[in-house]
Amino acid sequence: ETGVTQSPTHLIKTRGQQVTLRCSSQSGHNTVSWYQQALGQGPQFIFQYYREEENGRGNFPPRFSGLQFPNYSSELNVNALELDDSALYLCASSLVPGDPSYNEQFFGPGTRLTVL
Amino acid sequence: GQNIDQPTEMTATEGAIVQINCTYQTSGFNGLFWYQQHAGEAPTFLSYNVLDGLEEKGRFSSFLSRSKGYSYLLLKELQMKDSASYLCAVRTTSGTYKYIFGTGTRLKVLA
């Protein structure tokens, strides 16, 4: 059973550019959440996808968007990058909402994004 | 608004017991989580509480009081490897799910 993987590990972009981050969920998990974690802070919830539909969203602007694919891999897209978008981006996968094991989220190692 | 508070830092001695408190103010409560995060690593799940009371899992226990908006994580028989940040998080649901994390408590275990 493979764990949650993310790519790339590190990324450097300039202000105004667009970025796509990728996540591959743990085998059998069909729910994925994305988080932004600034240095020294707790993760901030961006959104959650279940069966390719967004079913939860935090306080992030529309330039943060996502996709979940039939194989349960997912993407986080950020348009018009700002300096404050520099952070560690984490994805976490879990089982279907309502399943007793749904509550255990498995996090990937993260993508460190730097915006210059 | 929605808010989670936990101490920024705590220090304890190897072999001791430490309690990390978390208070929250949220709407549509749907469970409270504790995660452990070592520096430079991803968070790992420790516990989940949705009903009042104590959940025990080995050296780790977590308590919840929904009426008080309060939880704690109890770590027994502290080991050096327990030095990490401990994150308290609440899941809310008002139609859709949302997770709110505290800033984390950095625990240092001293020999």
Image (cartoon, rainbow, N blue to C red):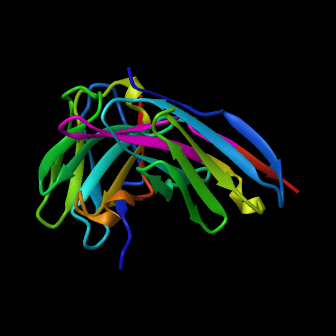
Q: Is residue A111 left or right of residue A93?
A: right
Quarter in which the C terminus of chain B is drawn? bottom right
Q: Nearer the viewer, residue A17 or A109?
A: A109
- Can the viewer see residue A113 in this picture? no
Give the x, y percent position of residue A41.
Answer: 53, 34
Q: Is residue A38 left or right of residue B16?
A: left
Quadrant in which residue A102 is drawn: bottom left
Give the magenta range.
B86-106
Q: Is residue B47 magenta?
A: no
Q: Nearer the viewer, residue B94 or A66?
A: B94
Give the main secondary structure, helix, strand or loop, of the magenta stretch.
strand
Q: Nearer the viewer, residue B15 or A82?
A: B15
Query: As displayed, is residue A40 above or below residue A48?
Result: above
Give the x, y percent position of residue A77.
Answer: 22, 41
Quarter in which the N terminus of chain B is drawn? top left
Give the x, y percent position of residue B108.
Answer: 76, 47
Residue pictured at 32% horizontal, 68% vertical: A26
- Can the viewer see residue A13 in this picture? yes
